[in-house]
Amino acid sequence: MWIITTHGFLSIVEDELDPSTVLVRGRDYNDVLTAARLYVRATGEAGARAEEIVQKTPEADYLYRFWASKSDFEPVILDLFRSVKYPNFKNAVKDIDPERAYTYGLVWSDLYEIQQDRRLINIFRDPDTIDLFDEGALE
């Protein structure tokens, strides 16, 4: 699952070897560190430091990651949800980090394409079903 918040972008997936664990990963160190800090706070592990659990993995598609128990990570998701205190997400991100807001805007725009014309997605599923030169094909 992808989570895009004012705190950053995370990709969270089930660990391949342990279904009770999630792999929390991201492209930006501070995004993953913020999630790790929330995780450490939620678990209340004495002496645990978020900086120690975040790993750098240059060979992977997501540069930073850490593993967490699914049940222990649930409160982190709830914390992120409870942190929503804005009427407009894009503006809230822009107030915090204008560069990130630009990147998020690109993602928003790409996802908007799905809403605008779902019929185009069907072309990619089965391109032989539509003649792109037939003006009525996408009506």
Image (cartoon, helix red, strand yellow):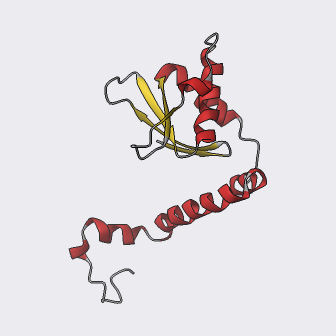
Occupied quadrant, residue 119: bottom left
Residue at the extreme right of the image, as rendered: 95
User: What quarter of the picture does the C terminus occupy?
Assistant: bottom left
Q: Is residue 97 left or right of residue 137?
A: right
For the point 40% across and 43% down, the residue is: 60
Q: Is residue 92 left or right of residue 52?
A: right
- As rendered, which of 132 and 4 lies closer to the eye? 4
For the point 61% across and 27% down, the residue is: 51
Residue at the extreme top of the image, as rendered: 46
- As rendered, which of 24 and 71 lies closer to the eye? 24
Where 91 falls versus 8 (above or below)? below
Q: How many marks?
A: 0
Instruction: Give how far across and how far down residue 91 sits, in percent.
Output: 74, 57
Where 33 falls versus 7 (above or below)? above
Residue at the extreme left of the image, as rendered: 128
Occupied quadrant, residue 33: top right
Instruction: Give how far across and how far down residue 132 sits, in percent.
Output: 31, 84
Instruction: Give how far across and how far down residue 48 sits, in percent.
Output: 61, 16
Instruction: Give how far across and how far down residue 2 sits, in percent.
Output: 50, 44
For the point 39% across and 31% down, the residue is: 14
For the point 67% across and 42% down, the residue is: 7
Q: Is residue 49 left or right of residue 64?
A: right
